[in-house]
Image: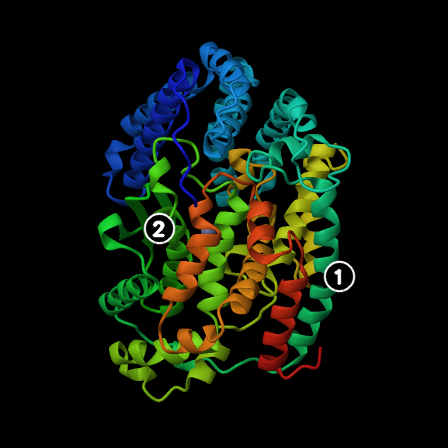
Amino acid sequence: MPETAPAPRSAAWETLAAVMCDVRALGGAVSLLQWDQETFMPAKGAVARGDQLAAVQAALHERLTQPRVAEALDLAEREASGDPDRAAALRALRFDHERAARVPQDLVRALAQAQAEGVDAWKAARNARAFALFAPKLARLVELRREQADALMPMLARRPEAQPDPGASEPYDALLEGYEPGMRVARLEPILRRLVGWLSPLVAAIDAAPAPEDGFLSGRFDGEAQWGFTLELLAALGFDPAAGRQDRSLHPFTLGLDPGDVRVTTRVYEAQPLSAIFSTLHEAGHGLYEQHLPGEHRRSLLCAAPSMGIHESQSRLWENLVGRSLPFWRAFLPRLAARFPQLAGVAPADFHRAVNRVERSLVRVEADEVTYNLHVALRFELELGMMRGTLAVSDLPEAWAARSEALLGVRPRDDAEGVLQDIHWAWGDLGYFPTYTLGNLYAATLFAAAGRALPGLDDAIAAGDLAPLRRWLAEKVYRVGRRKDAEDIVRDAAGVGLTDADFERYVKTKYGALYGLTL
Ligand code: ZN
């Protein structure tokens, strides 16, 4: 980023700079409390932790929504400072302030209550494998999300910078905007329809081909040796151990408190050696993004990714485009085999085939690259139906089963395997799932662009040198922070915005070769 001349001092800006500094600090404190909760907190700390989180989150909300923020924003926006970063920070603060301030306090409280009840009911329903126990709570959450969307809709109409021809807005857009600013259903629906159109026959063709041999992945893989290998991977990717750490958790995640303090987690199963490897690669992708955010803006809202989709594009890029590639395993299989002698005779090409096994399965989180977006398409259709009022909550289990059969070719035996498998709806998160597919598509587009910009990229990866790719991504994506919307970052880096063309080319080339198919 070019250095810009210092902008003139202004009382309104000073006020807002202090607000942003506090919002960042309180947000970091929330992350740290959450990280500890998932890693080291003793079980009996849970009650107090709930109080601690609620108090810090309330302080953050109050700081962001106080009326003088709106007054200072009005003033500061009128002062043309000539500093593009300051203008971008004001846009980000205006966005966050309005999204928080437009939702009435009663509704915020009702949502928090419904989410807590939703998670409890979802857990009970999963144990009983009976959706009916969760249905009334989900219906309540959908109703409250509609109210929230109504309160936020006026903000959508005022975003001329939203991506090309977004068409008419609908309530789902207002929720989507919370995860993926600028994205609209009118743009997502046709993309997902196209994806389903070419993925379904591809899955059928792969299904008819012989499955790759992966017998060498069974047996016991020592947990400590696995842990050592994940640290080796973090180092190879360039994750800075002086600016972050890796620990263990049940569900792997990444929390960035600051570019100088990024926490990633992984999990180790001795019978499933790939779990730790790919969890670490995935979270390291998130972690690299966080470590390379513009630290000079650490006290401003610009020191963040602009969307969940672009963040996920980086976890997917390192996990899949790099970590499931043949050049990567040419470099890293010998290092893995040095820790696990049972892999000594395995060829990189065979290992590559084994880590790219495609399977029709019921479970999204275990899905491969080819079927993953079909799981997302299923959820997107159903939550869109709920928000539009065309699908009743009581009809959800049957709709899920029917669409699962149509899209994935498998039908859940019960609600736990189907409609109850993700926790997202229990949190009331509607509009989140599509960001996973956006991540997959952006990852393919960015990786293709990196390949054009960096001749010899495959050779560097095959030599274990991941620095050129990391540097390119840092410059084009990570260091932009929140100065631009996600799709603009991708368009500026790759010359094209949201498209499934690069993903289609990547998937068909790779899996056509792996499964001996002419596509
Ligand atoms: Zn992720």
Tell whether 41 sits left or right of 123.
left
Q: Which mark is residue 197?
A: 1
Mark 2 residue crowding within 10 angstroms, few (<14) / some (14–19) / many (20+):
few
Q: Residue at x 65, y 69 (%)?
A: 505
Q: Secondary structure at mark 2?
A: loop
> How far across and how far down the image is residue 278, in percent?
41, 63
- Quadrant where the C terminus lies? bottom right
Give the camera-side residue of 142 and 135.
142
Task: From the top left corner, tell me how far across and down residue 239 is, in percent.
Answer: 31, 57
**Residue 250 shows which numbered tag?**
2
* Above or below for 54 versus 513: above
Secondary structure of residue under mark 1: helix
For image coordinates 43% across by 78% down, the residue present is 459
Q: Quadrant of the N terminus?
A: top left
The residue type indicated by label 1 comes to Gly
x and y percent of residue 104 in the render?
55, 14
Query: Which of the colour schemes (rainbow, by chain, secondary structure, one colour) is used?
Result: rainbow
